Image (spheres, rainbow, N blue to C red):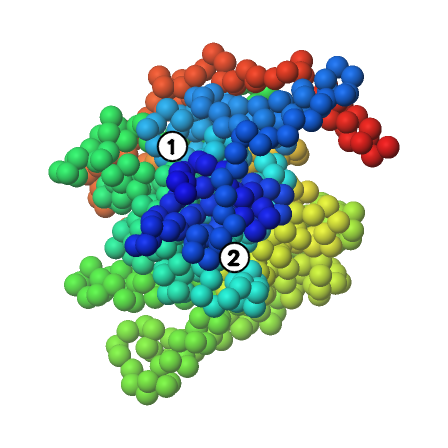
């Protein structure tokens, strides 16, 4: 019996198509096949002709012809139309994405059009915050599925947005992804045999790269699997190939034909790390010398910002934000604490200039930063430090080991909390009251960002007590929650009937999460010392599809105390610069040219050390020699390889339009039912 790939066979009462064959030593066959009859459709099987004696090729000569007795040959036309619609299409234009549940802007078609021009459809989507990268991924996946090249898909996304990503692809593109979060993995363990590879059992999955990284067994599964398409969201987290996640990403990139990477911050200022991302897409793109320019990488990425979009109908999907600056003059107790902090800082600066280490300066700055989040955050930090010093039972000649200094700081912080002289919280409370907010069902929803978990807890207790709101009306979100807890909170907040009126979030909620459904107001309770983080925060409600004006509130602490005034102004300058970036440049990372939030925080520390409130206008000595603007400048939709005159493929159909096809189809079903 001669069997070949593509041939149809029948065995065990079902029909299959052969996808692979091997010959045993005795001449019998091992057959890989995919089911095509109803019970086994889409499933993969392996047969051994020594065991399955009833394997037989399906002979077209034995086809039974059934007469079409319908008026106008309806059955024949419906059969032919179904074959046309289910056939793979080979085109460099959009074929099905225009029929999905989206109102796609032209710029959102660009990544797919550009990827289809490449020998292998592999691309970095580096559009700015809030431009709809998930939609762009969905368009690409829909097109690859239509071309018969998207049967097996794996999406890697941060654990906080697994459910969000999964729902977007299902609701808008009807692409079903099995979510392998902690609950999904638990179900697999209970339902699948221990030796069953979940990535072979499920064709389309979504999982966190952190989950893959932590579970050694998954690596074994990955080694035995291949995919048609792999998507890595927030790919900047895997740019360092020396890290565990980076090494895993490099390995996974070799296990697929098509690869899509997405990130609003596609590089961290290190030339070699960006090269790692490009090498994942196309290993031959970067010269062996490591020296590359725009000509080497431009074919493999798209990057746009809001100000690149000129179409008025598209810009209508973005609402212009309103910035509200809430001045919070510090109370006497707060000034007392911060004056003491300033004394420590200036002593530390003097000692540092005298040649001593920066430890005391960093401690004083750390206390200042914690206090700018909340008095409770600073207090908890001091308490933990005191416990460590006492447990150590020895003291070094530095501030953080000095129990007298730590004790003084503790007393001053407790006085602020006990006397309720926290000006920033008082201003938050007053602002909410002035806006008519009381936590009732009809009130607006708010997102409040703060860096410290202690601050989130502090706000939750105070707001609950002051506004007499129930527990379920206020929730907090942070990186310490499990993946299922994070997903449940974000999913619930995005529902119209959600009881949650205030979502308190750490910066774990600043990347990728959609918070703009039924919410257009947010507070930066504290100001992160990074423009990148600040832009990410604001982008949670100021993004594509926001139907109302996004109101972004900044709580600005103020004081005229010498030194302190400059420190506060340095932090406030970040908010002013972010607004300038929003209006003009579009890329927050291009201001400090560090492209890394941790490095930006260090630059702010240096500005405080040098009392330089003009630090954003001067170049940093830490800036890398490589200028990334040479890669990303002048990038727009009108790339040479793009089809801009008519991006959609004209469909081939027996019917004049879809409505006529479905009318005939439903009519046939109704007729058959009668």
Q: Quadrant of residue 264?
A: top left
* Residue, far left: 289
Q: Position of residue 365 (x, y in %)?
A: 36, 60
Residue 100, placed above or below residue 452? above
Q: Which image quarter is the C terminus in? A: top right
Residue 632, placed above or below residue 396? above
Mark linked to residue 180: 2
Q: Quadrant of residue 267?
A: top left
Residue 339 can be seen in this image: no
Left or right, 302 with respect to 553, comes to: left
Local packing at callout 1 (Cα closer than 10 Å; few below 14, some 14-19, many 20+) is many
Q: CA distance from mark 1 to mark 2?
A: 26 Å
Residue at image point 65% right, 26% down: 65
Q: Position of residue 334 (x, y in %)?
A: 51, 62
**Residue bearing mark 1:** 121
Q: Which image quarter is the N terminus in? A: top left
Q: Position of residue 130 (x, y in %)?
A: 51, 37
Q: Position of residue 144 (x, y in %)?
A: 47, 33
């Amino acid at each position: 019996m001669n069997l070949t790939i593509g041939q149809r066979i029948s065995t065990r009462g079902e029909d299959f198509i052969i996808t692979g064959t091997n010959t045993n030593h005795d001449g019998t066959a091992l057959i890989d096949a995919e089911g095509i009859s109803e019970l086994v459709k889409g499933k993969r099987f392996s047969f051994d002709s020594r065991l399955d004696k009833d394997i037989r090729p399906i002979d077209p000569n034995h086809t039974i012809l059934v007469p079409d007795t319908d008026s106008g040959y309806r059955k024949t036309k419906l059969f032919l139309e179904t074959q046309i619609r289910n056939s793979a299409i080979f085109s460099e234009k959009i074929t099905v994405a225009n029929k999905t549940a989206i109102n796609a802007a032209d710029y959102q078609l660009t990544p797919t059009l550009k990827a289809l021009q490449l020998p292998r459809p592999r691309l970095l989507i580096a559009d700015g915050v809030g431009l709809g990268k998930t939609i762009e991924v969905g368009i690409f996946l829909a097109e690859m599925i239509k071309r018969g090249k998207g049967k097996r898909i794996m999406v890697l996304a941060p654990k906080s947005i697994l459910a969000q990503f999964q729902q977007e692809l299902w609701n808008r593109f009807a692409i079903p992804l099995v979510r392998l979060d902690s609950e999904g993995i638990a179900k697999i363990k209970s339902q699948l045999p221990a030796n069953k590879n979940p990535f072979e059992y499920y064709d389309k999955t979504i999982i966190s790269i952190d989950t893959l990284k932590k579970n050694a067994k998954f690596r074994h599964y990955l080694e035995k699997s291949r995919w048609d398409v792999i998507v890595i969201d927030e790919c900047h987290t895997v740019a360092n190939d020396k890290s565990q996640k980076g090494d895993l990403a490099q390995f996974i990139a070799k296990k697929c034909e098509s690869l899509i990477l997405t990130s609003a911050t596609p590089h961290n200022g290190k030339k070699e790390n960006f090269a790692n991302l490009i090498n994942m897409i196309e290993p031959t793109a970067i010269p062996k010398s490591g020296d590359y320019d725009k000509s080497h990488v431009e074919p493999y990425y798209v990057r746009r910002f809001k100000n690149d979009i000129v179409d008025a109908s598209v810009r209508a999907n973005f609402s212009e934000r309103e910035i509200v600056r809430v001045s919070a003059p510090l109370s006497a107790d707060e000034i007392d604490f911060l004056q003491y902090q300033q004394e420590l800082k200036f002593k530390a600066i003097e000692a540092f200039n005298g040649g001593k280490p920066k430890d005391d300066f960093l401690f004083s700055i750390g206390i200042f930063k914690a206090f700018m989040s909340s008095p409770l955050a600073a207090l908890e930090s001091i308490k933990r430090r005191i416990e460590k010093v006492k447990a150590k039972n020895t003291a070094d000649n530095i501030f953080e080991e000095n129990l007298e200094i730590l004790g003084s700081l503790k007393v001053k912080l407790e006085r602020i909390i006990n006397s309720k002289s926290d000006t920033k919280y008082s201003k938050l409370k007053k602002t909410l009251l002035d806006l008519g907010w009381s936590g009732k069902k009809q009130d607006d929803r708010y997102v409040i960002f703060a860096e410290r978990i202690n601050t989130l807890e502090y706000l939750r207790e105070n707001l609950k007590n002051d506004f007499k709101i129930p527990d379920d009306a206020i929730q907090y979100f942070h990186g310490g929650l499990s993946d299922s807890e994070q997903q449940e909170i974000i999913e619930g907040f995005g529902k119209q009937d959600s009881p949650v009126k205030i979502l308190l979030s750490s910066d774990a909620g600043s990347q990728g999460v959609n918070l703009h459904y039924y919410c257009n107001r947010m507070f930066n309770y504290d100001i992160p010392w990074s423009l990148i983080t600040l832009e990410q925060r604001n982008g949670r409600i100021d993004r594509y599809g926001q139907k109302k004006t996004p109101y972004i509130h900044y709580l600005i602490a103020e004081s005229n105390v010498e030194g302190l005034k400059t420190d506060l102004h340095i932090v406030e300058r970040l908010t002013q610069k972010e607004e300038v970036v929003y209006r003009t440049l579009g890329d927050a990372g291009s201001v400090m040219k560090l492209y890394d939030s941790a490095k930006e925080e260090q630059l702010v520390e240096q500005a405080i050390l040098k009392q330089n409130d003009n630090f954003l206008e001067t170049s940093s000595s830490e800036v890398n020699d490589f200028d990334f603007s040479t890669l990303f400048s002048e990038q727009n939709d009108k790339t040479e390889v793009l089809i801009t005159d008519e991006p959609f493929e004209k469909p081939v159909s027996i019917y004049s339009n879809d409505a006529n096809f479905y009318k005939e189809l439903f009519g046939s079903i109704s007729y058959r039912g009668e």
